[in-house]
Amino acid sequence: MTYGLTFIMALMIAVVATPISMKLAIKWGAIAYPGGRHVHSRPIPRLGGLAMYVAFWFAALITQVWDDSIWGLFIGSTIIFLVGIWDDICEIRPLVKLVWQIAAAAILLIPTFGFSMDVISLPIIGEVNFGTLGLSAIGLLLTLFWVVGLVNTVNISDGLDGLAAGICFFVAILLFWSANRIDQVPAAHLTLALAGAILGFLLFNFPPARVFMGDSGSMFLGYIIGGISIMGLLKTATILGLVFPLLVMGMPVTDLTFAIIRRKLRGQSMATADRGHLHHRLLDAGLTQKQAVLSMYGISACFGVAAVLGAKGQWIWALVVLFVVFALLIIILMRRTAMLMVFSRRHSK
């Protein structure tokens, strides 16, 4: 089946399934209420992940010959998706959620599924084979860290209408470009199925949102992106290797890194929620939700451009783009902190 049909099939299924997921969310009590860190002003159903899960896997069922790796991805993503639904309805504790995330990622370590990152390739260093070095355990740990890290990266970026879905759509399209470029046909089909499922959901999620993806959606997307990137890119002995997926996810990864550092400096748990994320800073700077989302789309697009330039071997231009975008991110992420410090000094006098 052609790539276009894969994309359209997932898109149409998501368009049909999203309104159904909204009705189920209301029936099961998976509702996001305003207040606290939330910026929406009315109750909104948060079970959109169900629509993306159904659209993605139905398209994969029709378009793919299911080998062991796809079965592993299906089983692991189903576990993480069910945990997300549980959290959307009952709101489980962060530690319990983390344990289940690790368990779902560990599914990929089963030898039959073949997801271990024993071999990765990096710029300048080249190919690194942990197996031949007698360090296979490092490959297994990297797989766990990679998948769980991406699950939480997407989860933490889901703070504004259409934000996480839009970023993941860009990621899926760029991963398709990369997989197609190196003839990874199964990974290319899966990335297009993911892009179609996300776009169909995004029609209902773009500001002002009528539905949220919830943890069922954000954790599912992070898991699939992590799994597909291992299938199609990390196993490939090219300069793309580990760097391309990291660059494509550059903005949410940076936001997550700053969140961890910020909470550690405050003596808080890494799982503690706060209003210090990039999207909160943009809102505090006076941007509307739509303006903030579009701004972050633009930043993600810059990371994508850097990834493509790097994949084409134009590392100097890639580094220039990265330098500019990182400088912009640091300015935004530090802006509110500086303002608060000035404000606190004035009131301490």
Image (tube, helix red, strand yellow):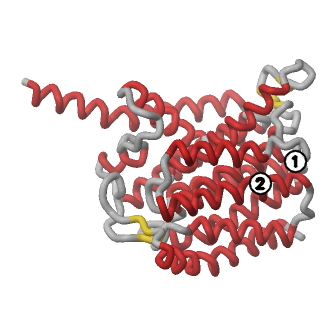
**Residue 65 at what x, y percent from top left?**
92, 63
Is 275 in front, or is 338? 275
Quadrant showing the N terminus: bottom right
Compute the Cα span from label 1 to label 2.
21 Å
Percent x, y for residue 69?
A: 87, 51
Q: Label 2 belongs to which residue? A: 176
Q: How many marks?
A: 2
> Secondary structure beneath disc 1?
loop
Q: Is residue 128 visible?
A: no
From this viewpoint, which residue is outermost toward the left?
349
Residue 19 image offset from top left, x and y in percent? 56, 80
Q: Secondary structure at mark 2?
A: helix
Viewer-nearest of labels 1 and 2? 1
Q: Is residue 53 left or right of residue 126?
A: left
User: In this picture, is 249 found above or below 85?
Assistant: above
Q: Earlier in the sequence, mark 1 or mark 2?
A: 1
Q: Nearer the viewer, residue 237 or 328?
A: 237
Residue type indicated by callout 2: Phe
